[in-house]
Amino acid sequence: MRHVIALDVGGTGMKAALVGPDGELLHQDRRSTGRDRGPEAVVAAILDFAADLYAYGEKHFGESAAAAGLAVPGIVDEPNGVAVYAANLGWRDVPLRALLAERLGIPVALGHDVRTGGLAEGRLGAGQGADRFFFVALGTGIAGGFGLDGRVESGAHGFAGEIGHIVVRPQGAPCPCGQHGCLERYASAAAVSEAWARATGDPAADAADCAKSVTSGDPNAVRVWQEAVAALADGLVTALTLLDPRVLIIGGGLAEAGDVLFEPLREAVRDRVTFQKLPNIVPAALGDTAGCLGAGLLAQDLLTTTTTPEVMP
């Protein structure tokens, strides 16, 4: 199998790689999305970046890429290769798979950024060897991906895994989704940053600062952190009740707090389960390479199967 192109598109930046058949990152690069120039400019930046990666592979490895995988945020129609909606990028119904395939002349797979990262964690990272896992990314928002036998479920309409919009505090804080009390309004890195900034009166204070203050015993930091952990545990218990994963993988910015997060979180989940089987709760292993590695897996799957493997029937 030849190398493939992997692109992980975020709200402001893009990470890319050429990935070998064994998952080795043969070449890595980063660029801005250029979103300040509008949604069309972002699409153009993606296509140009991919074309440059294709040319790099030809020049340095003596052969062209065999396929490409693209992970993007927002609502993604994976079977049809369409970026349905991405608020941060201003997208609506962008046929990214077709556009990139036309530009490169090779097969292209399109995936949701968090589910794609979960795919990598399940096959190559913290969930390796587990038949069922649930990956949760605690970033600006919260999203997840349920993995079964090396695949990640996207749902009938591309909404599967949106654990951040489970209501954990009825009549609570309003969420941009239109509900009140959503999990990501209490337990995302952004939510913890907002709560800690209010507690300190410092608008520059963030979740990382809060975690450091927890370790030093600051009572305000402990309160903010405990409230976030309690909300997260409530949401996770709902998810594990529905999905019964063998491994629960936690990634994203908030997970970088390490034991400051995982020790109280494991205890809080343990206190809440009754009949449910407690999964192994572990930190994500691949860091910010997960999206690229997952996009590479999507591309490689195109070469080894005749169906779209990342979408379960």
Image (tube, rainbow, N blue to C red):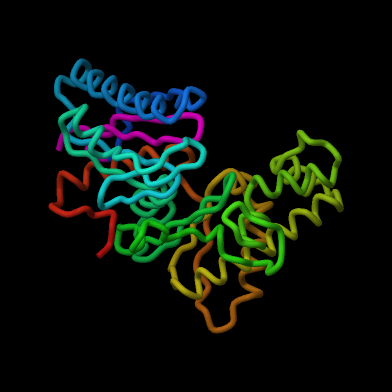
Q: Quadrant of residue 145?
A: bottom left
Rendered view: 274 above or below 69: below
Given residues 257 and 67, the one toward you in this image is 67
x, y percent for residue 131: 34, 65
Q: Residue at x 74, y 40 (%)?
A: 209
| Residue 189: % across, % down | 64, 46
Q: Residue at x 50, y 55 (%)?
A: 136
- Front residue of 41/250: it is 41
Residue 3 position, x and y percent, is 21, 32
Residue 32 left/right relative to 77: right
* Residue drawn where x is 60% and y is 52% of the image: 176
Residue 229 vs residue 16: left or right? right
Please check the rendered image and state whether residue 51 is part of the magenta-colored stretch, yes or no: no
For residue 11, above or below residue 134: above
For residue 56, above or below residue 305: above
Residue stretch in magenta:
1-22
